[in-house]
Amino acid sequence: MAEWANALGTLRQSLSLLRTRRFGTFWFASLLSNIGTWAQQVVQPWLLLSLGASPFLLGLDEFAMDAPVWVLTLIGGVLADRADRRRVITLCQSIQMLCPTLIVVLLLIPVLQPWMIIALSLIIGITDALSMPSFQTIVPSIVKRGQISSGLALNSTQFNLSRILGPALAGLLITGMGVIACYVASALSYLPFILIALWILPRQSPAPVAKDAIAIRQLFTGVRGIVGNRPIRGALLTVLATGVLCGPLVTFCPVLVKTGFDGNAAQFSAAIGAFGLGGLLGAMGLLSVDEGSDRRRLSTWFAATYGFIVMLAALTQWFWSLPLLLLLAGLSMNVSNTSANTVLLTTADSHLRGQTVSLYMLAMRGGLALGGLLTGLTVSLLGVRQALLINGVLALAIHIVIGRQWLGSLGHKPLP
């Protein structure tokens, strides 16, 4: 009973953040923005398939959106530490808002081709790589240090709630108004967050830069020290392996639904919605976890569980087991990645927080990019079930190895 009482007390304390002016406003604006984004994410692979795109092009679209982090995310980390984050976020969000707007225009003409969608995904990927480190540092900057893990879990809650509401909205819009309505909703959803960012984020004066500083040297300032930290290195490797090997389950879900189960857009939306529901449940569970708990264990074992779920999804022959597996996959992914992110943000020095977050984004988004491209090739060669089965087996084995090295070398002492 005492443990339940402590968990409920921790949950109430975590939820109290939503009543604060800055965090509460940020949370709701982010939710609205992400609902529109997920409505587009659901419809885009289906639109590509309807335009005659191959599974490889679906993987290429994912690669185009996530690959820029390999080149630009460290620059984004420097911008987060040294530039005006308010300006970085609003400029990049404004550029991203133009991309679904352009797709609406191209659908109306109509001249839309798969390569145009992929090109616009690349633009979104570039702006994401430059702005996401700034975005990820918002929560630590508007809550107390002891509330960082609760803030991250709450932020993850809205993200995963949008993963449920976005596909549901997409299903309604596709049925009632067509694909184009999803892109209209996506474009409009950027406005609340841009306005809130302009209002709630303080202006920052750029950090002074020495006149004789070398750009490349500035770019990698602190990276060696960050990666040399064992908890941070273990967290980054866990997130990277998850992105490369488990992330393609969501990327190629439309192919699995359409070719593996002869399903339709409504079934695809249900499967993706289940993934979001699982992520929401995982985030809510994390809200009840004590701040002093060792997040390394959570990250490692839920990552391994995610790999096992990918294996089961590849083997199942009954469609309605797929949403259940995706629910468990969303839960596992969210607990693992959010726990890893908590390790990063509570371990890193505050003056290197932006660059630390950029390495997290490099591992997560870069892993998704590489995984999407490689899995797209194996899907084209072997089929979607075989490709996902290979990914799941490799993920399970690699996470067990990473976990043994990460936890075994550090012992069981909880992080502060």
Image (cartoon, helix red, strand yellow):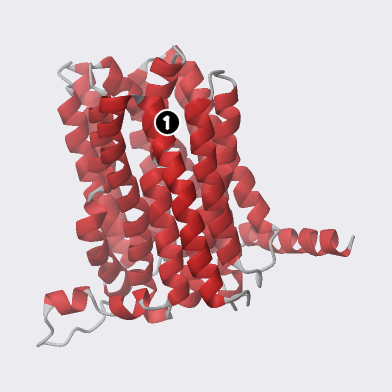
**Residue 87 appears in the picture as rendered:** yes
Q: Give the residue displayed 64% in from the left and 56% down from the top.
A: 286
Residue 168 on image: x %, y %: 52, 26
Residue 76 relative to residue 387: left or right? left
Residue 413 on image: x %, y %: 63, 77
Corner quadrant of residue 5: bottom right
In the image, 243 versus 157, the foreground residue is 243
Q: Give the residue displayed 23% in from the left and 56% down from the top.
A: 70
Residue 346, placed above or below residue 7: below
Query: Which quadrant: the C terminus?
Result: bottom right
In the image, 120 versus 386, the foreground residue is 386
Residue 4 relative to residue 136: left or right? right
Corner quadrant of residue 136: bottom left
Say what amino acid the circle numbered 1 marks: Ala
Residue most toward the right?
Answer: 1
| Residue carrying label 1 | 39
In the image, 212 versus 300, the foreground residue is 300
Query: Which quadrant: the N terminus?
Result: bottom right
Residue 346, placed above or below residue 177: below
